[in-house]
Amino acid sequence: MSKFLGTVLKNLIYGKIIIQENSSGTVPEVCNMGIIFYLFVFIFGLIVGSFLNCLIYRLALPSSTQNIECSVGGLKNRSYCPFCKHILGWQDLIPVFSFLFLKGKCRYCKKPISFQYPLVELATGLLFLLIINYQLFPKIEILSNLTIVELLDVCFLFFVSCFLIIIFVYDLKHFIIPNQVIYPAITIAFIYNVYQLAINNQQLAINNFLSAFGAAAFFLIIVLISKGKWMGVGDIKLAFFMGLLLSFPNILVALFLSFLIGAIIGIGLILTE
């Protein structure tokens, strides 16, 4: 029995699961179950996405509002309905499923819940899956062979995806990139590139640094020429962050796509007026 339980634990850790005992009834047969690992990552992403929703909402609250609203505005306090201010229970906070079960309405005041919440949770879960699949797919079946460097890369990409989701949603809602998000994002990306220098990956790190300063300088020129009418200082910070991530020539593709998509959306808004 101890041998059987040991094999179960070992294979669960390594991304496998026991399906049945063999004909002798003593040695378990195992099948490859990388899907279990993917499911775990997706659920973890949903949970992180729920936390990101909390950040997006509470970053927009002025400190005075946080103090007035029953002291529930701070991140250290429990979540509440933005309409009736009722403290939410655990059954109201299950990512995606609570939204579906409650039919998109608050349990207590029946006011509609924004679709932002399930969409951010799903987006985070899917991004985490894509990161795992891109970074670790060949080694999913043998998780014990992962190196510290690979794990750090995955954690870094998880952080980056979270920062980008917050920036995207917050900017979409409030037309501003909060310093409370972009500065930590730049700091972590900067430290990651210093770490790349430390592990003898100088070419990538130097490329990233030059791309960051180049992209930021390009946006700074646009801001100065337009006197802030075309773009703001937040775009300079975001460009610096993206340069630290993408390096050259990927940053050029990102800038081209950002201008192209922005132009398409702008033309669409003009035509619909």
Image (cartoon, rainbow, N blue to C red):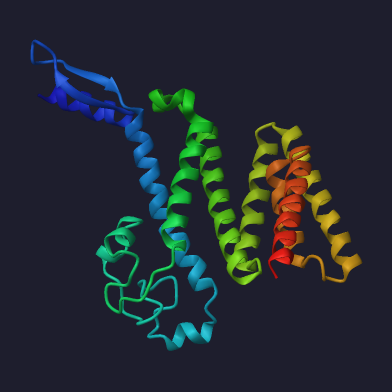
Q: Residue furthest right?
A: 225
Q: Residue at x 35, y 65 (%)?
A: 104
Q: Residue furthest top?
A: 24
* Coordinates of residue 31 in the picture (x, y in percent): 27, 20
Q: Residue at x 43, y 54 (%)?
A: 121
* Coordinates of residue 177 in the picture (x, y in percent): 65, 66
From the viewer's side, name the closer residue of 124 and 210.
124
Above or below residue 118? Residue 82 is below
Q: Is residue 71 visible?
A: yes
Q: Residue at x 43, y 67 (%)?
A: 114
* Coordinates of residue 102 in the picture (x, y in percent): 28, 65
Question: What is the quadrant of residue 89 in the picture?
Answer: bottom left
Q: Is residue 87 left or right of residue 258?
A: left
* Coordinates of residue 15 in the picture (x, y in percent): 33, 29
Q: Is residue 100 left or right of residue 26?
A: right
Q: Is residue 147 visible?
A: no
From the viewer's side, name the closer residue of 98 and 43.
98
Question: What is the quadrant of residue 2 in the picture?
Answer: top left
Quadrant of the drawing holding the C terminus: bottom right
Q: Is residue 14 left or right of residue 146?
A: left
Above or below residue 70? Residue 133 is above
Quadrant of the drawing holding the N terminus: top left
Q: Residue at x 64, y 41 (%)?
A: 195
